[in-house]
Amino acid sequence: MALEASWNYLARMSLAAGDTGATRIRLEVCVDGLASAQAAEAGGADRIELCSALELGGLTPSLAMVEACRAALTIPLQVMLRPRAGDFCYSTAELDCIRRDLEHCREAGADAVVLGILNSAGDLAIPALRELVSELGTMKLTFHRAFDMIADQQAALLSLAELGISHILSSGGQASAVQGRERLASLLRSSAELGPSAPVFVAAAGIDRDNLGALIKATGVREVHVGSACRTQVDSQMKHRNLQVHMGLDACSDEYARLQTDAKLVRELVEILS
């Protein structure tokens, strides 16, 4: 079973790269549901990051959604493991939830999980990370933007490389990848010095069609992560509407509209990267 899962992962990565040995910069699209995941693939995305609650920065999606996306997609699927909003310093009970969600994702056929765990000092929670790495099986692990909350990113890079982390999602410690481009460029150089098994940096935060090309030139990054740049507003099918009730959203928000990934917008980014 492990060999089959490994083969399937390699096959999906080969498909994502066009199976030509091409070195086109890879596009990862963050989605929160099946329709968005399918649109991202249709638009030419190389990889999906599946989350829930994108308005909170992304939380763990349901197992049913993981299974539905895995069944529908041919490109690699990675799943966010973040049990709550807020910081990345988790209790023992929360860490156990992350571990069990990781097991479920592995059994569901996910190609990778995305997580980040820090201790109260703002450093990597190495013991917890080491335990989770041991549970991956054939899955890969991306350390998400908790990396941008760490004081010493260079030291953290070395530790994550030693743990065998596959990818690091980062904006260079700034609010956006454009603002953090100099740090990102430095981190990419440091990663390259560690050799081919070092974590791959994925630029994230605030990336869109207007700044993508310049960001690549400034940093040399070979993988990028986008979310809102590929989403468009979709109106609700509800005909009866009670505008006095708000289900947890800001009172100024529209309860009868949602954001969904648009294949056309994904395709526009793919064309820039080609």
Image (cartoon, rainbow, N blue to C red):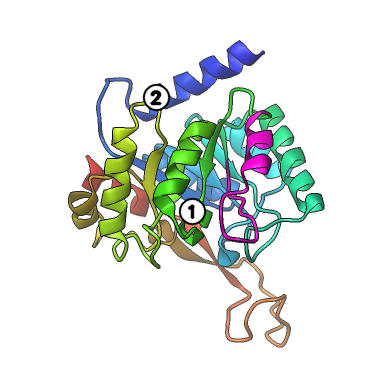
Q: Which residue is drawn at 64% across and 55% down?
A: 119
> In front: 246, or 153?
153
Q: In which quarter of the image is the C terminus?
A: top left
Residue lying farthest right? 93
Crowding near pointer 1: few (<14 within 10 Å), some, many (20+)? many
Q: Which residue is drawn at 56% across and 30% down?
A: 111
* Residue 162, horizontal then vertical, whole percent: 49, 32
Side of 96 relative to 266 (left or right): right
The residue under label 1 is which amino acid type? Phe
Side of 118 relative to 272 (left or right): right
Residue range of the region highlighted in magenta in the rendering: 114-134
Crowding near pointer 2: few (<14 within 10 Å), some, many (20+)? some
Q: Is mark 2 on a helix, strand or loop?
A: helix
Q: Do the residues labelled 2 and 1 touch (CB within 8 Å)?
A: no
Label ID, residue 147:
1
Side of 50 relative to 217 (left or right): right
Q: Is mark 1 on a helix, strand or loop?
A: helix
Can residue 251 be seen in this snapshot? yes
Side of 186 relative to 10 (left or right): left
* Residue 266, horizontal then vertical, whole percent: 36, 49
Q: Residue at x 26, y 42 (%)?
A: 189
Label ID, residue 15:
2
The residue under label 2 is which amino acid type? Leu
* Residue 240, horizontal then vertical, whole percent: 70, 76
> In front: 48, or 260?
48
Q: Which residue is drawn at 66% across and 73% down?
A: 239
